[in-house]
């Protein structure tokens, strides 16, 4: 029996594959009052005593909202304490300190800052500011930024105390850049200011704190 010869089939031509198209993920628009967590920061200037050194500290928020035009809303800020870092160039510049700190010293300062004797971030991973009232303050000049007095309860290291923040707000597109400051004593929040060498080297009890937040405007 004669069989028909087998003819080799032409291989399928190589066709260029369609490039994988990236998924176009559209970010959810921020709700009015939402804090832009990527851009917002808190800064702290730590003073010195004796032969100590001043420090600039920067930290991030875990979540937050501030409704500047709806003061009856329940507003709060939650700070991520493990993100707080001492003596970055940005932090030192923001709080008005010149010079830099070497990496070895920074590591030691940050270990003390986050450790059990100061912030104790393992036991107290967050700090919070629960806003109770927002009052618009008349500006000295019509062209000056909007001014606000923000009052509420600040919880740090497991202790809650009332604070008042004076803040300026400047609109920039869909956001308002809100900047304000206040001062606290570490000892009032159950924190013993760091010292060594029998107090000859250490940091001051008072901390100057700045908030630099980007808040979503009403639509």
Image (tube, rainbow, N blue to C red):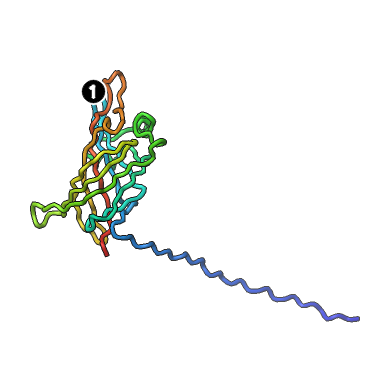
Q: Nearer the viewer, residue 93 or 114?
A: 114
Which quadrant of the rendered structure holds the C terminus? Answer: bottom left
Residue 44 located left or right of residue 22: left
How busy is the neighbourhood of tag 1: few (under 14 within 10 Å), some, or many (20 plus)?
few
In front here: 53 or 140? 140
Relative to 162, does residue 2 appear above or below in the rendering?
Answer: below
Q: How many marks?
A: 1
Horizontal and vertical percent position of residue 91: 28, 41
Can the viewer see residue 105?
A: no
Residue located 32% across and 60% down the image: 31
Tell me where residue 107 sits by quadrant.
top left
Question: Left or right of 100: which side holds 125?
Answer: right
Seen in the picture, residue 190 relative to 199 is either above or below; the reply is: below
Q: Quadrant of residue 200?
A: top left
Residue 11 drawn above or below residue 80:
below
Name the residue: 32% across, 51% down: 64
Residue 98: image x %, image y %? 23, 36
Query: Circle 1 sits on which residue?
Result: 50
Where on the picture, by quarter, is residue 124?
Answer: top left
Farthest left residue in view: 141
Nearest the eye: 72 or 104: 72
Regarding mark 1 in the picture, which secondary structure is present there?
A: strand
Horizontal arrangement in the rendering, residue 64 relative to residue 22 (left or right)? left
């Amino acid at each position: 029996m004669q069989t028909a010869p087998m003819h080799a089939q032409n291989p399928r031509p190589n066709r260029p594959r369609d490039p994988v198209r990236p998924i176009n993920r559209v970010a959810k628009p921020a709700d009015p009052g939402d804090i832009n967590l990527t851009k917002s920061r808190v800064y702290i200037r730590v003073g010195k005593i004796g032969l100590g050194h001043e420090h600039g500290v920067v930290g991030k928020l875990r979540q937050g909202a501030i409704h500047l035009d709806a003061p009856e809303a329940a507003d709060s800020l939650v700070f991520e304490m493990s993100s707080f870092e001492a003596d970055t160039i940005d932090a030192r510049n923001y709080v008005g300190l010149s010079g830099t700190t070497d990496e070895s010293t920074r590591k030691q300062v940050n270990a003390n800052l986050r450790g059990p004797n100061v912030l104790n971030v393992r036991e107290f991973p967050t700090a919070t500011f629960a806003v109770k009232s927002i009052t618009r303050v008349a500006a000295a000049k019509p062209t000056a930024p909007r001014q606000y007095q923000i009052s509420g309860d600040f919880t740090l290291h497991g202790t809650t105390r009332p604070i008042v923040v004076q803040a300026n707000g400047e609109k920039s597109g869909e956001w308002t850049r809100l900047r304000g400051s206040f001062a606290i004593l570490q000892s009032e929040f159950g924190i013993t200011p760091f010292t060594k060498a029998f107090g000859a080297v250490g940091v001051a009890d008072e901390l100057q704190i700045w908030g630099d937040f980007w808040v979503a405007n009403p639509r």
